[in-house]
Amino acid sequence: MNKAIKRLLFYWITSFILATILYYILWVIMPEHYVFGALYRMFLYHWEYPISFIVIPCFFYGVIATLFAETFLKQKVTKQILLTFLIIIITILLSSPFGGMLWHYYDMKAGYFPSNWILKILKLGFEWRLGTGWVIIILYNIIGSIACFF
């Protein structure tokens, strides 16, 4: 098997396993199991289907980490840290719209299918998640990182 494919599978599998384990650890220790945040009066599909929302950033992280792996290995520690932040930012920007699209899919699956459902998923999923999704992901990464540190 090609080295790039092995790396991609490694990043996909390990990020998914670690994110899922971290989610369930947080689920156990968070009051009332509130791991993901929600906006006021928002349907809580990400609470009902957490794994599907975890898969999306893990997928994009695997692709991006594989693309930057060779460059990462050649850098000194300071540049590796900066490259890690770049990988996180790109992962958030790419995965947020797809999280929004998934949220709209679950909303429609619950009985709210309009006649132009594909366009709605594409348009609103990208708009909403580019507007708020990245903020939510960053806040939970910071909170999760601080909680894990202590």
Image (cartoon, helix red, strand yellow):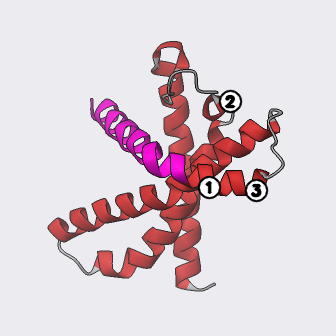
Magenta-colored span: 127-150
Point 54% across, 66% down: residue? 10
Q: Is mark 2 on a helix, strand or loop?
A: helix
Q: Which amino acid does label 2 sit on?
A: Glu
Earlier in the chain: of badge 3 and badge 1, it is: 3
Q: What residue type is labelled 3?
A: Ile
The residue tagged 2 is 48
Q: Which of marks 2 and 1 is in front?
A: 1
Task: Give whichever of 127, 22 is nearer the camera.
Answer: 127
**Which x, y percent locates residue 139?**
35, 37
Say if the magenta span includes residue 19. Answer: no
Residue at the spot of label 3: 118
Q: Left of 122 or right of it: where is 95?
A: left
Residue found at the far front of this picture:
115
User: For the residues carrying marks 2 and 3, which lies nearer the camera in this image?
Assistant: 3
**Residue 45 percent location from the top left of the image:** 66, 32
Q: Is mark 1 on a helix, strand or loop?
A: helix
Side of 33 relative to 105 (left or right) = left
Residue position marked by numbered label 1 in the rendering: 123
Residue 128 is a magenta residue: yes
